[in-house]
Image (cartoon, grey):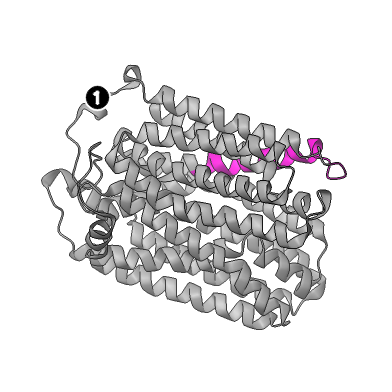
């Protein structure tokens, strides 16, 4: 029951965020007439807030009850969404977006820790997969509903979206608090936790620098970090800006094609997620990450063909988003459990927070890279760079598989999880 409540909490939170995400730039730049600089600054500050919050949220999840950390972060996100309604100046809007990024991302490591605490090793991939599916569905439904309630011609036209986002995070916080009640405890929660995924509420009394050194001392985690960075740069960093910009400036497709591609991406994830989890149940996480990187390579190669077939450019672009989605169905269920299984004892939340910050930070670089390259009209270079990054991810995942196989499980209780990871 706790896992179901966590999945529902994730979906409802992303439903609220989905109502805001597609329209925030146009609202700030055009509706409020604050200009593109403020609109871009708001997106950047959101990313900065997320980058700062991820390691802090993970650290707090190690030191305190992760339920309290997740609930508090979601309440911060709700307050920030309400603040966007009353943000009548650029400074207020920028501040609210910074707080929004802090609230949304600060909850993520704590939620991952809760899955690891409340779900047995054999079911973790499935629960993480359901969480990812719920988030994708929530985002899609939120964006769809917002299309009918948002009016960018008036300054109050985004208020329903902001209010929906605030309500979504409030409900999400309530569901997590409910899941944390003792009445939902199961036999699994009472079993001795293994060292690789256990979270001691007190946490180790070490400084952030010592924690970073402890994490970085694990060779497999160093390769996991490279996999995380390269896979983020290879797709997620370009999902919202680089790929749409390539479609508009190089392929010259219609704006509606971009919306269709995003919808196809969500649909493929929703349809295939649990099928892929079942089919890959016995496959190691590093091997799956190698497969994800290979799919990234294939996606960019397919997209490159669109420039040589203008009449099929729109179809190829939409197809590429669908191929990327197949890789996402393998990526989402395995990365957090793998990272947690490799984390030093008592630093699971800290490790997850660090890796979330890595992914967020490098994803924030993506739009800047795309703007420079595509602004110069170098469409072929844009594709080539991302093929190279994805090939690097294949190599990093291959080295990660070897490193995991060399790592000896800490205790007898961790052998099942370590075997699954390897």
Q: Name the residue: 47% across, 65% down.
A: 231
Residue picked out by circle 1: 187
Q: Magenta stretch: residue 145 in it? A: yes
x 78%, y 41%: residue: 147
Where is 306 relative to 285, above or below?
below
In the rendered image, which quarter is residue 82 located in? top right
- The answer to whether residue 93 is above or below residue 380 is above
Q: Is residue 54 magenta?
A: no
Residue 207, given in percent of the width and then of the height, sits at: 24, 54
Q: Is residue 1 left or right of residue 171?
A: left
Q: Is residue 186 above or below residue 43?
A: above
Is residue 124 visible in the rendered image? The answer is: yes
The picture quadrant where one finds residue 65 is top left
Span highlighted in magenta in the image: 132-154
Residue 260 location in percent, x, y? 74, 53
Q: Quadrant of the N terminus?
A: top left
* Picture coordinates of residue 107, whole percent (x, y): 45, 41
- Left or right position of 27 against 403: right
């Amino acid at each position: 029951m706790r896992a179901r409540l966590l999945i529902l909490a994730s979906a409802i939170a992303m439903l609220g965020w989905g109502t805001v995400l597609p329209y925030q730039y146009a609202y700030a730049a055009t509706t409020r007439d604050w200009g593109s600089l403020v609109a871009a600054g708001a997106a950047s500050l959101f990313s900065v807030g997320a980058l700062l919050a991820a390691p802090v949220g993970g650290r707090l999840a190690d030191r305190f009850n992760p339920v309290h950390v997740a609930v508090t972060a979601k309440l911060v996100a709700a307050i920030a969404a309400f603040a966007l309604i009353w943000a009548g100046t650029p400074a207020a809007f920028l501040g609210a977006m910074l707080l929004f990024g802090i609230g949304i991302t600060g909850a993520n490591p704590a939620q991952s820790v809760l899955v690891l605490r409340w779900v047995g090793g054999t079911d973790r991939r499935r629960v993480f997969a359901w969480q990812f599916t719920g988030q994708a569905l929530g985002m899609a439904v939120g964006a769809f509903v917002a299309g009918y309630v948002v009016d960018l011609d008036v300054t109050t036209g985004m208020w329903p979206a902001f209010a929906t986002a605030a309500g979504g995070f409030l409900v999400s916080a309530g569901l997590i608090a409910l899941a944390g009640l003792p009445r939902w405890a199961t036999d699994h929660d009472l079993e001795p936790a293994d060292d690789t995924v256990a979270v001691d509420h007190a946490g180790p009394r070490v400084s952030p620098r010592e924690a970073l050194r402890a994490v970085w001392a694990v060779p497999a985690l160093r390769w996991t970090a490279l996999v995380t960075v390269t896979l983020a740069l290879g797709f997620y960093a370009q999902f919202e800006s680089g790929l749409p910009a390539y479609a508009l400036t190089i392929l010259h497709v219609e704006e509606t094609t971009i919306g269709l591609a995003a919808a196809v991406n969500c649909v493929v994830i929703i349809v295939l997620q649990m099928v892929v989890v079942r089919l890959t149940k016995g496959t190691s996480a590093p091997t799956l990450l190698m497969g994800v990187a290979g799919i990234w390579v294939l996606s960019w190669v397919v997209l490159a063909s669109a420039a040589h077939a203008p009449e099929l450019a729109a179809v190829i672009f939409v197809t590429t988003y669908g191929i990327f989605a197949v890789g996402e169905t393998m990526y989402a269920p395995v990365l957090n459990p793998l990272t947690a299984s490799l984390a030093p004892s008592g630093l699971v939340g800290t490790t997850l927070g660090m890796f979330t910050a890595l992914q967020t930070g490098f994803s924030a670089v993506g739009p800047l890279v795309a703007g420079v390259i595509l602004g110069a009209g170098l469409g072929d270079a844009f594709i080539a760079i991302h093929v190279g990054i994805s090939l690097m991810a294949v190599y990093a995942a291959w080295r990660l598989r070897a490193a995991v196989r060399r790592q000896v499980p800490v205790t007898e209780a961790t052998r099942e999880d370590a075997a699954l990871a390897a």
